[in-house]
Amino acid sequence: RRIGPAFRTSHPLASGPVVQPAPTVDGFVETFLGELNYGQGTLLSQSTVNDQYLALARTVRRYLMADWLETGTRRRQTQQKTVGYLSAEYLLGRQLGNNLLATNLQDIAQVAMERCGIDIATLRAQEVEPGLGNGGLGRLAACFVDSLATMDVPCIGYGIRYEYGIFRQTFEADRQVEVPDSWLSLGNPWEFPHPERQVLVSFGGSTETTTDADGRERCTWTPDWQVIGMPYHYMVPGHRNGVVNTLRLWSARATQAFDLQIFNSGDYAQAVRAQTTAENISKVLYPEDSTPQGKELRLQQQYFFVACSLHDFIDNTLPADFDLRRLHQRIIFQLNDTHPVIAIPELMRILVDRKGFAWDEAWEITQKCFAYTCHTLLPEALEVWSAELLGRLLPRHLEIIYRINEEFLEEVREAHPGDEMLVRRMSIIAEHPERAVRMAYLATVAASKVNGVAELHSQLLRDKVLPDFSRLWPEKFTNVTNGVTPRRFVRLANRRLSDLLTETIGDGWVTDLDRLRELEPYADDAGFREQFRAVKQANKERLTTLLRVRDGLELPPEAMLDVMVKRLHEYKRQTLKLLHIVSLYDDVVSGRVPAEQVTPRTFVFGAKAAPGYHLAKEIIFLINAVADVVNADPAVAGRLSVAFPANYNVTLAEKLIPAADLSEQISLAGKEASGTGNMKFALNGALTIGTDDGANVEIRRLVGDEHFFLFGMTEPEVEELTARGYTPSAVYESDPQLRSTIDLLASGHFTGGDRQAVAPVVDNLLHQDSFMVLADFRAYLDAQARVDAAYADPDAWSRSAILNVARSGYFSSDRSMRDYLERIWHA
Ligand code: B1N
């Protein structure tokens, strides 16, 4: 059967405009009922909530379609430079609300659903969020494509359509249990499969070099297996601007060859298993955030989506006669961390082996087509692939990498004759403990620009991670501080604040977040502060209701809401937060502090641990154990409560962040590349308690010292202490309050007397403490005391909170995109 495009015709109807449904309640109802009847094949009276949700989603889709097709046509015609964002993760969050917002159909849809006797909130709740990412890196990609569409910049987001996204977290006996995220099982109305754009991807086999008639070497790669990449397109609407860009996610399918094998093979079952191998490639998202394991399937995933994406752009998006020497005028591939870095040798392979370019010319083109973003400082997070594995899976790519490395090291030798130590340090190929490819080095050598994700991070990247490279090519290095989309994280998540902002300064802030500055004078307006507090209070009540229904949690709606939500990792120091809670509790139960003197606080945690990260899972257990005891103890009733709702995700973030008073950003200085949750909290009027790390540095500088609770060692102090030798047990011995806190934990008080159960975390703190929790404990408690004092003055607190909002416009991902455009993409 044929799968190519049917025809391109000059028939008069072929280029006619697409008819959009009327943007009225009547038009919406009619379209909705049509979708229910003809799309779902059901009657309103017979329909399930899922039928109704799908019909509603397809209705909204209809309103976007004309703009999507129009944007595509425009992009093909204007031949502008496109951003090809290559990312293994997109943590999109729910689509329905976002797309209703983008199309300005929120109110119409609500009334239309009421007319059909349907509560639209019930339908919204039906949507399973696409959790195709782990945390900040994947969410950043989603924010960036949102901003590019809003700014009408041509962008194709390329990624993987995992059949299972990030696992769903549940707790059993306080321990994390992972449940597969079968997000597609009830149907996905937001995607469009495009079998006519499918791509073949090869793996394995061997290479052969021959010399042709005019003396040129030619390499042929004879792979031994192939899979099909099937693209699914997602709409990425700009904010009310008629632009809809495309996110193209690849799904792996078995090739016809598998069918033939099945047909011809006596061993039918074996042949079908081979098909499973192919389809496994896009089966599941690796749930490790920051500490990837060097698994073969992960490398298959990386090459799979990158090969599909490059092929898609070069062979199916560019005009057939395009001169590839001008490739960089039409595309810049932005590498979201090292996960897509195998795209570099892939482009070289396409240009040299398939398109017949000479090596040097191909290298010149390739260097102009890539830019690399690094998202980490943790050495264990820098991806390294063993040469054995890479050569087995992608033999031609390994050869290409070797040649890139040889020529690069020649350049190093020329610049620094006789310095063989330097050559070994900078080599893309590591020799110990085994021969392996350093993907960050490959990216740095090939990319036109290398950027970190916050000022401090970019500085440390230059000085600590890639110092030799930044000396060789200082101009290659730059910074682009991360940002977040104000559409989802203010306008959609915090409708009450948004309405107040719009009433006060107009609605321009939604696409021009610097306008929030206009709010500054209102910080001194008592009436405005009152309204601002009412918004926060209403958001807290909404959250309280949600957590009651969702998690059976009973929380006092008046207490200070102190929130720490992010992946669970030692460097982020959830244990520091836990020690604070235990010390407050200890103060009261030991009688040192009367309960009435404790500021009422609700502590909220949200965190998933990578399933194989044992210590992280012990920390989750301990937080839950402490929560159980604290929440049940009448001694602190009405004063301290701890909530750890399971399965923190984008959907929950949208409810939690707008309700927060205090944002916990307490990583060890020099470890968190940027953080982006920190920005979302500030924009929603929470104050931050934080270390001098990642983007906290910039947040503090912008909002002002008086409106930020800074504590802890600085990065140079951390370095110094490491050099001196850090002994956590000595800190424990020297601070009576810390001793009492740890002793209470260690006693088994929170685990029904079981000291064994707390030992993994307690022993680690006392004898290892790689991230210096104990060293920063005192400073953290002092800062928390300053928080309590500040919170006691509601007017001063609201003033600070308002100034946080007013001065955080810089953290819009629209600004990040402008920086990328200016400093890196030149698009
Ligand atoms: O990327 C975010 C930053 O704001 C965070 O500080 C940073 O920790 C995060 C391997 C990662 N860095 N590295 C990852 C994710 C998945 C994976 O398999 C590494 N995530 C970050 C956005 O810049």
Image (cartoon, rainbow, N blue to C red):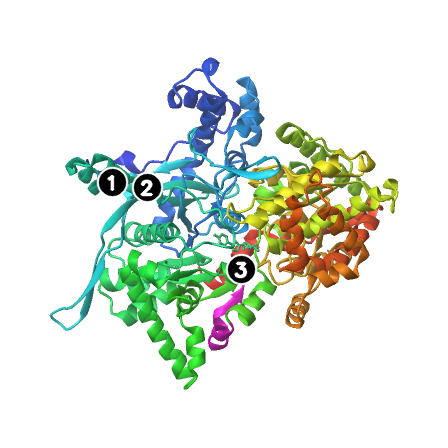
| Mark 3 residue CB less than 8 A from any atom of ligand 1 | yes
| Mark 2 residue CB less than 8 A from any atom of ligand 1 | no
Residue 5: numbered disc:
1
- Which residue is labeled 2 in the image? 279
- Mark in the foreground, 3 or 1: 3
Estimate the x, y position of residue 405 in percent, counting from the top left: 35, 71
Look at label 3 and name its amino acid.
Thr
Q: Bounds of the magenta span?
A: 467-479
- Which residue is labeled 3 in the image? 376
Look at label 1 and name its amino acid.
Pro
Local crowd at mark 3 within 10 Å, few (<14), some, or many (≥20)? many
Estimate the x, y position of residue 366 in percent, counting from the top left: 35, 65
Task: Name which residue lies at 46% across and 14% down.
Answer: 46
**N-term-proximal mark, 2 vs 1:** 1
| Residue 827 position by quadrant | bottom left
Task: Name which residue lies at 47% across and 58% down.
Answer: 337
The question of residue 471 being in magenta is answered with: yes
Question: Regarding mark 2 in the picture, which secondary structure is present there?
Answer: helix
Q: Is residue 503 left or right of residue 109?
A: right
Q: Marks 3/2: CA distance?
A: 31 Å
Name the quarter where the N terminus is drawn: top left
Local crowd at mark 2 within 10 Å, few (<14), some, or many (≥20)? some
Kindly indicate whether the residue at mark 1 contacts the one at mark 2 (C-beta within 8 angstroms): no
The relative height of residue 515 versus residue 770 in the rendered view (above or below) is: above
Q: Is residue 670 left or right of residue 319?
A: right
Question: Regarding mark 3 in the picture, which secondary structure is present there?
Answer: loop
Residue 790: numbered disc:
none
Q: Marks 3/1: CA distance?
A: 43 Å
Task: Name which residue lies at 62% across and 42% down.
Answer: 621
Is 717 or 505 nearer to us in this picture? 717
